[in-house]
């Protein structure tokens, strides 16, 4: 009887090994596929959905840990949840990428006229400041303080405009348009204080 039970245990152990072996290949494939799928969207996910990426990374790590422990069933069981999370991540990244593309196109449209108008405004202010600085009498409505403010404003506007131009050159049209608009607003104020038309 004892011999029989030992033999039975050996058969059961063998069956268990076979059962585990039969799940090892699918589990291995699951981990490999999960890594590949996630790698393909990792850059976009890090940029647009870092929290979701962190959660799905944790799931993938758990799958790897279970595989390493030989718990292949747990790996296979985790696949549907992983796939659902991956689809959600892809949807988020796709939507945010689309939003970013639309925002970039809008910023480019804003940048185009600003890139032409603002340098002309800055040049006009520079010319006006040069003329007023040499004049013995300031025109009505223009004070020494407003002239001094215009001079210091020119420096800051030129510096900001360099930043805007560099941003545009590097493809950051959103930053370029924002900075350029701020320079234009400042230039409009200075022109008014110097009795100039900004139209």
Image (tube, rainbow, N blue to C red):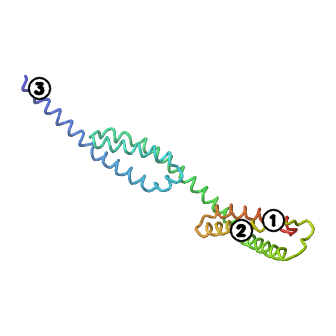
Foreground residue among 170 and 194:
194
Residue 173: give x, y in percent of width and height. Answer: 63, 64
Side of 52 relative to 122 (left or right)? left
Quarter-of-image position of residue 163:
bottom right
Q: Residues within 10 Å of mark 2 (few under 14, many from 20)?
A: few
Residue 100: give x, y in percent of width and height. Answer: 60, 57
Q: Nearer the viewer, mark 2 or mark 3?
A: 2
User: The residue tagged with tag 1: helix, strand or loop?
Assistant: helix
Quarter-of-image position of residue 155:
bottom right
Q: Residues within 10 Å of mark 3 (few under 14, many from 20)?
A: few
Q: Earlier in the sequence, mark 2 or mark 3?
A: 3
Q: How many marks?
A: 3
Quarter-of-image position of residue 157:
bottom right
Does 142 sit above or below residue 50? below
Q: Residue at x 34, y 48 (%)?
A: 31
Q: Residue at x 70, y 69 (%)?
A: 158
User: The residue tagged with tag 2: helix, strand or loop?
Assistant: helix
Q: Earlier in the sequence, mark 1 or mark 2?
A: 2
Q: Nearer the viewer, mark 1 or mark 2?
A: 2
Foreground residue among 42 and 151:
151
Q: Earlier in the sequence, mark 1 or mark 3?
A: 3
* Mark 2, residue position: 155
Residue 102: give x, y in percent of width and height. Answer: 63, 59
Does 54 sit above or below residue 170? above
* Mark 1, residue position: 190
* Mark 3, residue position: 5
User: The residue tagged with tag 3: helix, strand or loop?
Assistant: helix
């Amino acid at each position: 009887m004892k011999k029989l039970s030992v033999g039975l245990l050996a058969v059961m152990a063998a069956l268990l090994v076979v059962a585990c072996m039969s799940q090892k290949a699918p589990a291995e494939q699951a981990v490999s596929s999960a890594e590949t799928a996630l790698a393909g969207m990792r850059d976009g996910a890090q940029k647009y959905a870092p929290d979701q990426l962190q959660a799905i990374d944790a799931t993938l790590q758990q799958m790897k840990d279970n595989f390493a422990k030989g718990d292949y069933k747990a790996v296979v069981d985790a696949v549907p949840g992983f796939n659902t999370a991956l689809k959600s991540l892809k949807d988020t990244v796709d939507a945010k990428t689309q939003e970013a593309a639309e925002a970039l196109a809008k910023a480019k449209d804003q940048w185009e006229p600003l890139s032409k108008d603002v340098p002309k405004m800055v040049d006009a202010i520079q010319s006006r400041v040069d003329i007023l600085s040499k004049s013995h009498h300031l025109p009505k409505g223009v004070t020494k303080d407003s002239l001094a403010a215009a001079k210091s404003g020119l420096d800051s506007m030129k510096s900001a405009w360099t930043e805007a131009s560099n941003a545009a050159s590097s493809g950051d049209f959103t930053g370029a348009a924002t900075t350029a608009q701020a320079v234009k607003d400042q230039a409009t104020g200075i022109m008014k204080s110097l009795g100039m038309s900004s139209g």
